[in-house]
Amino acid sequence: MLDQLGREINYLRISVTDRCNLRCRYCMPPEGISLKEHRDILSFEEIEKVVRIGAELGITKIRLTGGEPLIRRNLADLVYAISRIDGIDDVAITTNGILFPGLAAELKEAGLKRVNISLDTLQKDRYHYITRGGDITAAFNALETALAEGLEPVKVNTVLINGFNDDEILDFCRLAFERPLHIRFIEFMPVGEIKYWHCKSIIKNSDVFDIISKHYVLKPGKISRGSGPAKYFVLDGGRGSVGFISPMSNHFCSECNRLRLTADGKLRACLYGGKERDLKEALRNNLPDEEIRRIFVETVLSKPERHTMGDKPWGTRDRKMYQIGG
Ligand code: SAM
Ligand code: SF4
């Protein structure tokens, strides 16, 4: 599928739930969220149908996310079903990792190829603070489990926030030097709990690069699968790499290849902008596959040239990250 600007759209990110077992301060309010009823969330059969039709149109890569995808019961069944769909060659998950050690083996057996684990700090107390109660040992275990299961490349999502974890940049580099992990520094975006966000909280990735370059020789690199919007650099002499995802300072919209499916069945062309189209209604009304195809094509053709996150006034949009799928 090509959009109006000639971008090839082959990647679908699916939020399988808007619920989470953590409450990261920048993502969710402390009291949690007004949860969707189970019937409002797409069933595995419905997601499978969307992926099948998407694959017929050219989708090849799927990422399951949320909320926290691993709290959706029997997630391995969904991984199994979608990884067997003709045309799908990559099924990955983004997770906070808390439940991962107990599920990794069955997910891998079901067809999971890769995992991204979110970790914003390497310090126990800070982790407990930012996640409102999370145990960092579980997140570390998740990294080691992913490596042990060979779910490589194992990527770590690290959102840098000025005044919170900006003093840990080199600690993360040391981790990537010592372990075969790919640390991705993500610029803090004005989505989610906007009360926590301030434009002064953003650390530009060019500044992060400069800090790292004073201590490590960085060589531009590519990792074997799923490079996406990150620009990767190998740490000379080390085992892993660092990557930079810079939606705020240097948006990568011209290379964007993705669509997003919300937990409640809306198809979106952009994390931050664009109209949602309702697939759930089409599925529940048993409309023919042709109608689902039409919604896909319409969404692709409506993909905006770029997101508007960097434009003032700053502010959150209609939907939160945990609803759309981060
Ligand atoms: N619960 C899973 C997790 O934490 O990995 C998946 C969903 S979470 C919304 C996906 C990713 O979005 C996480 O790496 C999280 O840190 C990131 N994220 C959430 N809010 C963000 C923000 N305001 N700016 C940048 N990244 C954000
Ligand atoms: Fe949950 Fe992920 Fe949001 Fe943290 S970032 S509250 S783990 S959905």
Image (cartoon, grey):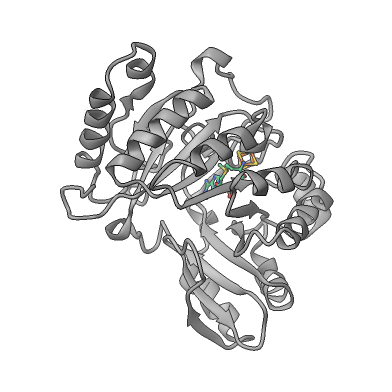
Q: 55 or 254, which is in the foreground?
A: 55
> On the picture, is 137 further left or further right than 315?
right
Q: Locate residue 221, reporting x and y percent.
A: 49, 79
- Give the quadrant of residue 46: top left
Q: Locate residue 7, reporting x and y percent.
A: 24, 55
Q: Locate residue 60, reporting x and y percent.
A: 39, 50
Q: 94 or 34, which is in the foreground?
A: 94
> On the picture, is 309 further left or further right than 184?
left
- Give the quadrant of residue 216: bottom right
Vertical side of 280 occupied by 95: above or below = below
The residue positioned 30% from the left and 40% from the top of the image is: 56
The residue positioned 47% from the left and 61% from the top of the image is: 226
Residue 326 in view: no
Vertical side of 134 occupied by 49: above or below = above
Q: Locate residue 161, reporting x and y percent.
A: 59, 56
Vertical side of 207 occupied by 149: above or below = above
The residue positioned 66% from the left and 55% from the top of the image is: 120
The residue positioned 80% from the left and 54% from the top of the image is: 141
Q: 39 or 251, which is in the foreground?
A: 39
Q: How many labels does the image show?
A: 0
Classify the position of ligand 2 by quadrant: top left, top right, bottom left or bottom right.
top right
- Give the quadrant of residue 256: bottom left
Q: 203 or 274, which is in the foreground?
A: 274
> On the picture, is 200 further left or further right than 241?
left
Residue 309 in view: yes
